[in-house]
Amino acid sequence: MSDDVHRFPGDPDEWRSVDENVGTVDGKMGTVDENVGTLDDHRRGHPRWLITGTVVATFLAIALLAGTLVVGKLRGGTTTTPGATVTSYLQALAAGDAQRALSLGAHPPESTRFLTDDILKKQIAKTPISDIEVLRESTAQASRATVRMSARFGDTTSEFSVLTVKSGKGWKMMRTAIRIRGFDGAKTGRLLTLFGQPISGDISVFPGYAQFAGTGPNLTVSSSNAFVKPDWLMLGMAFPSQLRLKVVPTAAGADAAEKAIKAAFAQCLSSTDLRPPRCPNRVYSLGAVPGSAKWGEPSELKFGRTLFLWRTTTLVYSLGSMTFPVTYTAADGPTSETVRRYVTARVDLLSNPPTVTF
């Protein structure tokens, strides 16, 4: 052994360069021996603790660099910042991972029937999510924060706000789905579908494209542009009237509605009541004998402006001002008069035949 080589207990007989033991770091940092040198270089006057410490420091730097790739994530579907939470949520939607998206919510939705991977993949096939960006965070309260986001849904870029809440050491979204309220399950279930499944009552959906459809003898429903806006995540709810649904009566439905109105008028005019129930022809006269009315033909029935109330699948006709001639028995004998009323008729086109309410 040469006098100028310092050996320590346990040293091997032959020294190898550190780069043979450590190798390279993705080609970005060069070989370790380029930065640290070999043990042969360090035999001359450099203690081994310095060599070991340098290698450890190198590995610590690598570990810290790798750690930056996972900053913001914790276990259990939470993240360390409000913005990271919403970003992870949108990334989960973009990847078609419904369970991951739902796990980032503080409160589970009432129903997950339309919150599945299968439905989500149909949504993102039509409106893929991209260009996700946190615009700003507002943490006025320690336990709550509002995050302003920007994301592209298909061809549309949306800016929207999302409410997040503190959850342990991280953050979760207050709501991860939007509840559409106001569907009449007893009626729309016979006509409307969402992604081919019948709708019954309120539904919960992720933001994005929504495929509503429906066909009946009197109505058709289409939704080529139906879109559940991410803005609605803030309140977690919306109403059917906010969707871009196109619900229109068919030609057969409009014809059936007019026939139903004429039949309803005929029934009302055949009554001997002074005020037939659910009818527009009514007379108010003190002393008139109940059941003594005889109604004549009203003024010409004109089907004027119509308004379709899709939520109740009802077609509303404005029939205008109409006159109804009537004779009845009063205290002093038979009496005739003409009653004038402004009349509207509501026709439920889901009933078969359609039902009419004046």
Image: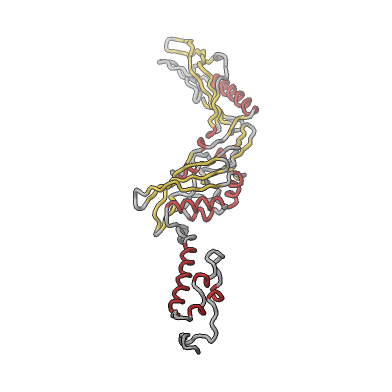
Colouring scheme, one of rainbow, by chain, secondary structure, one colour: secondary structure
Q: Residue furthest left?
A: 141
* Residue at horizontal 55 percent and vertical 40 percent from the top: 156
Q: Nearer the viewer, residue 242 or 95?
A: 95
Does the image show residue 304?
Answer: yes
Tell me where residue 107 appears, x and y as whole percent: 44, 52
289, 189: nearer the viewer: 189
Query: Quick check: can you spot residue 190?
Result: no
Residue displayed at 43% across by 50% down: 174
In percent of width and height, residue 119 lies at 59, 49
Residue 105 sits above or below residue 41 on the image: above
Q: Position of residue 64 (x, y in %)?
A: 46, 65
Q: Nearer the viewer, residue 38 or 348?
A: 38
Total numbered circles: 0
Nearest the eye: 63 or 292: 63
Q: Residue furthest bottom?
A: 1
* Residue 238 at x, y percent in the picture: 48, 40
Residue drawn 55% across and 13% down? 299
